[in-house]
Amino acid sequence: MLPANCIAFKEWAVICAALADGRQSLIVRKGGIQEGPSGFRVEHREFWLFPTYLHQKPEALADESRPLLDRVQGEQPAAGAVHLGLYAVVEDVVSVTDESLLTRLTGLHVWSHRTLSERFHYRRPGLFVLTVRMYRLPNPIVIPDSPHFAGCRTWIDLPSEPPLSTAGLMPVVSDKEFARQRQAIQAAVQFAIA
């Protein structure tokens, strides 16, 4: 793990909460509008999760996961502040080009099947599944929000000098539980590292 990092990955706050709770160890990504026609690329193998609150809606989640959205909305930081307390290390990157594999991921994430299908078909068929080992700080780092963070894109540079330290990060799940989740993800997508 890097000793410090100033790269963040924008993700719905409800997905950040599912990752923080150990409900899932995967991120599904197609790419933001600002990433252009080439789409998403795994530019960084380690990053802070940057929770976003736009575009989240109950129907985007599996029925049993919808209460998580209510919790996240109730915990949203005050306007003008961003809380960074989750750190991801990418273990596997799989390019999924067969939509039928998405149903095999059911139970390994909190999205609805419809949401994954819509993301799969956006622009051109396919999406990326990232298996991530999640870590958390006991107390999040609070930084001021900035127009620099706006827009539909995945990666953002955190204007922090020095870069944010990863000291004190603790794994969200045990090594054994992460190995179990990783194996289930690999089996579901017929493990082919991109």
Image (tube, rainbow, N blue to C red):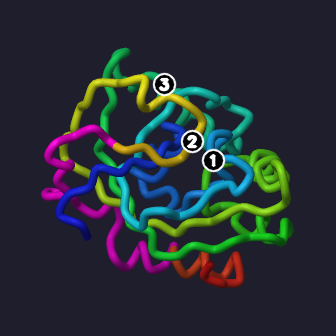
Q: Residue furthest top?
A: 79
Q: Are marks 2 and 1 in contact (CB under 8 Å)?
A: yes
Q: Give percent across and percent down for residue 79.
A: 37, 15
Q: Residue at x 45, y 49 (%)?
A: 9
Q: Secondary structure at mark 1?
A: helix
Which quadrant is the N terminus positioned in?
bottom left
Which disc is residue 73 wearing? 3
Disc number lying in front (1 or 3): 1
- Indicate which disc, 1 or 3, sits on the residue closer to the N terminus: 1
In primary-sequence order, the first of circles 3 and 2 is 3
**Element at label 3:** helix
Image position of 68 (left or right of 30): left
Mark earlier in primary sequence (2, 1): 1
Q: Where are the magenta residues, as a range?
A: 158-181
Q: Are marks 3 and 2 in contact (CB under 8 Å)?
A: no
> Residue 35's mark?
1
Where 116 falls versus 67 (above or below)? below
Q: Nearer the viewer, residue 172 or 134?
A: 134
